[in-house]
Amino acid sequence: MKILSDLLDKKLVSSLRGGASRRSHVFDKIVGYNGIKRTFLRSFSSKEPVHILLIGPPGQAKTLFLKCILETFGGKKAFFTVGGNASKSGLIDVLFDIQPKYLLVDEIEHLKPEYQTTLLSLMETGILTQTMHSKVRQIHLKTWLFATSNGTKKLSEPLLSRFIVMYLNEYEFSQFYEIALKKLLADGLDKKAAHGIAISVWECGALILT
């Protein structure tokens, strides 16, 4: 029995280590922003929900942060939506039905005020309530909200106050070049052509990243 117990303990330790190792590589696709990466990694280990809002201009990997989380944890633990496409009933149904640990909202500034109120309630109390046709349903969730926005003007002050707000600065040339080269090589271009295109795009001031 002791041998079996030892084996189970070893499997458990190995499993825990594997999970930690997987989390540590969540953002390998993203160049730079090490402070933001560390904040996310710490939030994954938190016993209580941590809510993070990324703010910055387009093309700065905000959406990629959310997609990396979705890829790592999958559809059972994480749900991704875009603020402009979300409806209140649809968002509430997802929270009731899937009960995701991580709710990922891209371009949260495009959520209507009443939808922002729903999220605020979730962040403040963890309680989600829906009233329809005199019927009430309620659920208590432990959900981490990770979101992106191009700015804060359209976000309510109470909602904003619940976030750890982190700003993404524009990439420097070395970071842009590394990202562009990796993307172009992955698309099948040879290194010389990829180098030339990356330089040209930077000089034109254009952004090829999404």
Image: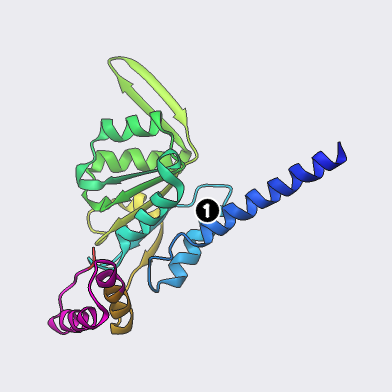
Q: In the image, what residue occupies the spot 58% across and 48% down? A: 47
Relative image position of residue 164 (x, y in whole percent): 43, 59
Please state if 57 lies on the left or on the right of 123 as rendered.
Answer: left
Viewer-proximal residue among 5 and 51:
5
Name the amino acid, label 1: Phe
Viewer-proximal residue among 86 and 131:
86
Q: In the image, what residue occupies the spot 24% across and 45% down? A: 111
Magenta span: 182-208
Q: In the image, what residue occupies the spot 46% across and 70% down? A: 35
- Few, some or many residues within 10 Å of mark 1 (<14, 14–19, 20+): some
The secondary structure making up most of the magenta span is helix
Magenta span includes 187: yes
Q: Quadrant of the N terminus?
A: top right
Instruction: Classify 10 as above or below 38.
Output: above
Viewer-proximal residue among 174 and 143:
174
Query: Where, by quadrant of the figure, is residue 8 drawn?
Result: top right
Please state if 206 lies on the left or on the right of 168 as rendered.
Answer: left
Query: Where, by quadrant of the figure, is residue 103 drawn?
Result: top left
Q: Which residue is mark 1?
A: 44
Q: Quadrant of the C terminus?
A: bottom left
Magenta span includes 138: no
